[in-house]
Amino acid sequence: MAFRLSPLWWPALALASPFIAPKLAKKNRRFKENVKKAEVRNAERIAGARPLDLPELDFLELTVLVEEKAREGFVGDAGVSYQFVTDRGSLLYDVGFGPERPALAHNAGRLDFTIDHTDAVAISHLHPDHMGGIKASRSLQVTVPDQLGDCGNKPCFLPDRAAADGFDAQVVEAPQMLAGGIGTTGPLARSLFFMGFTEEQALVAKVKGKGLVVFTGCGHPTIEVILKMVRHISDAPLYAIGGGLHFPVTSGRGNRVGIQFQTFIGTGKPPWKRITDDDLTRTIAAINDAGPKKIFLSAHDTCDHALGRLVEELRAETTVLEAGGVYPLSD
Ligand SMILES: [Fe+2]
């Protein structure tokens, strides 16, 4: 298991600890308050959720524009951008690191994808790897590369308040239909130590003769909470789960300057605690209990060790998503 923080940082950390420790203590108080706030808010939202009138889709297909793993000729990146096409239309879910990194523009070019090809955009949550980069996240402005063409004032469904220049920005507050016969769970919250109170929405669709297909961005609210909400949205059987589950157990993605950021940020734990194999064991059991037939894993926020365990231990047919891949979800 690699160091989460390179030993080269340790002397500096020791020297700075008198300054850092009080800041961390203060942050920890806020983090704990937010843990309670998120639990209360999610429980109220789930209890108050009404069934969504999800149409039965004859056809549902996912094209992966951005993912950590990539097919030959495509650029991999620790972000997410998925294009869903149905017999009723289409929806782009997340825009990776947007113009800050080459993956989205390059891969979209290879797949001949522009915003023209989608009816609407939905952003899972307002983090850099989903809404268009670090600058986009800091300024709360969804940003797509110019190569994706005119945004055409298409709807951009957001889980929390943000801007989306060129789009018709709409903040989602509860489960609702989005586009292409695909719905959203509405925002579900999670307290994150460094990233703060984070709202994330997952997608839900109903495939004729199969059941529900659920896709997450990072899975910050936890798949357990997301599935609780899904059960209130529809009583159709669960057919497939896809997207990020956030399990950087032995390492993170996109490590920089000797720091495995994903193992500190976005874990729902304080930085001195790490995500463990026991946490993963519990989630695997929860998914197996939910009984989906298919799983499509995102590697962008989950390490290879965790992916290996998921592929091995999940009872569903499990696939790791790759940029450039086209995945039929109605077969
Ligand atoms: Fe993510």
Image (cartoon, grey):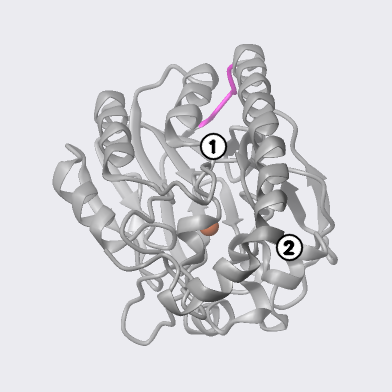
The relative height of residue 194 versus residue 118 in the rendered view (above or below) is: above
Label 2 or label 1, whichever comes before in sequence order: 2
Q: For numbered disc 2, what is the local secondary structure? A: helix
Tell whether position 257 is magenta: no
Q: Nearer the viewer, residue 99 or 24?
A: 24
Q: Residue at x 27, y 53 (%)?
A: 306
**Position in image of residue 316 (x %, y %):** 21, 39
Q: Nearer the viewer, residue 183 or 315?
A: 315
The relative height of residue 225 versus residue 293 in the rendered view (above or below) is: above
Q: Is residue 49 left or right of residue 299?
A: right
Residue type for callout 1: Pro
Confirm or deny contact between disc 2 and disc 1 (CB under 8 A): no
Q: Is residue 83 left or right of residue 315?
A: right
The relative height of residue 276 versus residue 35 in the rendered view (above or below) is: below
**Among the 4 quarters of the image, the one containing residue 282:** top left
Q: CA distance from mark 2 to mark 1?
A: 19 Å
**Position in image of residue 89 (x %, y %):** 58, 51
Residue type for callout 2: Ser
> Circle 1 sits on which residue?
221
Q: Nearer the viewer, residue 249 or 226?
A: 249
Q: Residue at x 73, y 82 (%)?
A: 146
Magenta stretch bounds: 51-55
Note whether ligand 1 is within 8 Å of mark 1. no
In the rendered picture of this protein, how many numbered marks are placed on residues? Answer: 2
Is the N terminus in the top left, top right, bottom left or bottom right quadrant? bottom left
**Position in image of residue 142 (x %, y %):** 75, 63
Q: Is residue 270 left or right of residue 206?
A: right
> Circle 2 sits on which residue?
137
